[in-house]
Image: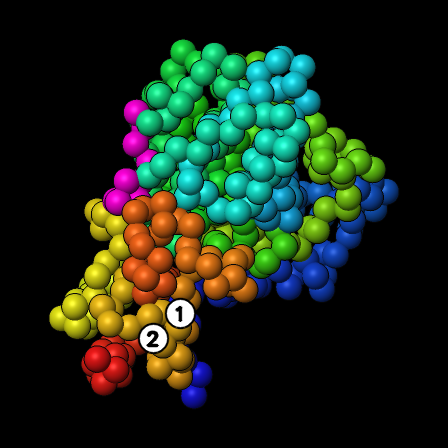
Amino acid sequence: MSPVYLDCNATTPLDPAVRKVLLHFLDEDFGNEGSRTHVFGARAKQAVQRARDQVAALVGARRDEVIFTSGATESNNLAILGLRTAAESAGRRHVVTTQIEHKAVLEPCEVLERAGFVVTRVPVAASGAVDPEAIRAALRPETFLVSVMHVNNETGVRQPLDAIAQVLDGHDAWLHTDAAQGFGKDLDPLRNPRIDLTSISGHKLYAPKGVGALVVRRRGYERAPLQPLTVGGGQERGLRPGTLPVALIAALGEGAELAVRDQARRQAACRRIRADALAALVPLGARLTGDQSLVLDHVLNLAVPGLDSEALMVALKDLIAISNGSACTSSSYAPSHVLKAMGMSDEEANGCVRLSWCHLTPEVDWGVVAARIRGLL
């Protein structure tokens, strides 16, 4: 019998309704969206435009503000490195980000740094959230970009995007958020019109891997002056060339629409699982990571004193599938940069595991999980 999958922050299962859309455009309406001479191309184009509307509606944007990509990593690179030329032309080579960003933001920032940019990485509190006033203090007249994630992938802690948007009132720096973890789960913050650039991934939203988007909002009549990272074909407003993966895009659109329609039901299911998990694990002395009032309903990052994360994962591997950090850095045994930024020692950080679930998660026998852990103490 397989363990119950509790690693939805790494990737989510495919929603049955999304799978149905995916298979339809793989098997039946499989045309190229760029083909204009027959009905197969026309249907593909209609599917892509519908998906633009679905993704845009979730964040309160417009159809023509959605650029489809392969996922949030590509979107982050396009948002950050795509602004390089404009920043250099303006003589404004300063970027503000945080110490807890995903590597898909931190590493493009390092590329800019090697090119002569100055990058300010704002620390976070033990709560796991950045202080908006620390963002204010980091701003300079030459700041061209501020990049702060929506929800942290390891801790599930929401970042104060609305407050950061207010801090930027009167400053014309472009505001980017890596919303891979919160898109479709924490809706209102991403609808703030001051957020210029929003990166998303389908596989965090019960859609397939390999598709995502960058939402590029107009600010008045102005768009962020992005330059493409690759060329050849001119698709997606010239920012992301290549034949559009219609089936993946249609599936992402369906995932976005379902996220809005079913939000209340999904949140209720996740809250029930969270309550059951806490009831079983807190009596064991589990230490919860970050300010729990800021954590989304489907995430628990915790440590059991006296146990390191590797021992815990091995002991529970036939019961529940969990992780001890970002899936993108799972090959590294270094302590989590996120947990270190929150003030943890190496030993404390190495003791933490992440449990993440969703509305599709089956029943977990938390009593058996707790008994297994108790036997290790």
Residue at image location 48% in from the left, 63% down from the top? 333
Spot the residue most to the left: 283
Displayed quadrant of residue 270: bottom left
Q: Magenta stretch?
A: 125-133
From this view, report whether residue 170 is shown above or below residue 237: above
| Direction bottom: furthest residue | 1
Which residue in the structure is indicated by mark 2?
312
The crowding category of the residue bearing disc 1, from other C-alpha atoms within 10 Å (few below 14, some 14 to 19, many at least 20), is many
Magenta stretch encompasses residue 364: no
Q: CA distance from mark 1 to mark 2?
A: 9 Å
Give percent across and percent down for residue 140: 45, 16
- Residue 133, position as x, y percentages in the image: 30, 25
Principal secondary structure, stretch drawn in magenta: loop
Pointer 2 local density, CA inside 10 Å: few below 14, some 14–19, many at least 20: many
Whether residue 126 appears in magenta in the rendering, the answer is yes
355 and 377: which is toward the camera: 377
Residue 180 - label: none
From the viewer's perspective, tell me whether residue 242 is left or right of residue 315.
Answer: right
Q: Amino acid at mark 1?
A: Ile
Q: Looking at the image, is 147 positioned above or below residue 23? A: above
Can residue 59 be seen here? The reply is no
* Count of all numbered marks drawn on residues in the image: 2
Q: Which residue is mark 1?
A: 322
